[in-house]
Amino acid sequence: MANPGLSIKLIHPDSQPNLTQSHRTQKLILLSKPRAMRLTKDLHSKYINNSNANVVPAKIYYQKDSTYMAQVSTGTFRRTPPISYFLDVDTGSGIIWIQCQECRNPGHHCFYQRQPLFPSLESLSYQKLVCNRHPLCFPGRCIGNFCSYLVQYDDGATSEGYLASETFNFDSNSTSRNVVFGCGINQIKMDRYGTGGGNVAGILGLGWSSHSLVNQLGPNSTSQVLILPPNNAQ
């Protein structure tokens, strides 16, 4: 029997019941800023080829006029089930990251989210990648003895943290172990995620880099099914 592939239910962020009309308006205003920056850059680069290879285009533009969230559960705990999070689906991003509790440490930053920050140190399946010993480590990028990541977007937003492996559960009831993701301990200029109820906890990268979920799950992941529910936002 052929492998049916991974199924992930996509959820429009404005369909969440805890959003008021005011919250939706605020979100649209915040999303319009990176959209304007992206359009300006596109027009500029059309005539002058001076793109910065270290900058990832703002997330909203890979979804054009609409963005979707995916619900995933992660972690393995002694007395409680895995924690469920909504992640912003980004088909242009090459990394998965979730805010972790360490972002509350002095000198670090978190954006507001409704769900508890991921308690990485309490998860039995959480494992930091030792510096430069895993094929998905970024060469020379470490925090102490462990691999780290730093992703920067066109609008100046950044996320930084540890690279680690963890168990993820998806809407299709499938479980994927040892998925490498970013445990975000310092998020800068990402307050737009905290508006409108704080549903989003991070990014689900579905791009084609080696760090993306698509490539980490192997050849069969190319047959994944993305279910788009109707937008029930009023």
Image (cartoon, rainbow, N blue to C red):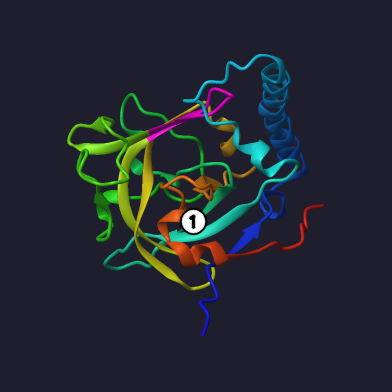
Q: Nearer the viewer, residue 176 or 219?
A: 219
- The residue drawn where x is 57% and y is 25% is 154
- The residue drawn where x is 71% and y is 33% is 26
In this rendering, the answer to whether 13 lies above or below 83 is above
Residue 28 locus on image (x, y percent):
73, 35
Residue 196 locus on image (x, y percent):
65, 41
Q: Nearer the viewer, residue 112 or 213?
A: 213
- Residue numbers of the magenta segment: 150-160
Residue 154: within the magenta?
yes
- The residue drawn where x is 69% and y is 25% is 33
* Left or right: 20 as drawn, with respect to 126: right
Please give the residue where the numbered disc 1 appears in the rendered image: 214
Amino acid residing under circle 1: Val
* Left or right: 215 as drawn, with respect to 76: right
In this rendering, the answer to whether 21 lies above or below 222 is above
* Left or right: 187 as drawn, with respect to 80: right
Residue 153: within the magenta?
yes
Q: Nearer the viewer, residue 28 or 80?
A: 28
The crowding category of the residue bearing disc 1, from other C-alpha atoms within 10 Å (few below 14, some 14 to 19, many at least 20), is many
Residue 91 locus on image (x, y percent):
59, 47
- State the SS at label 1: helix
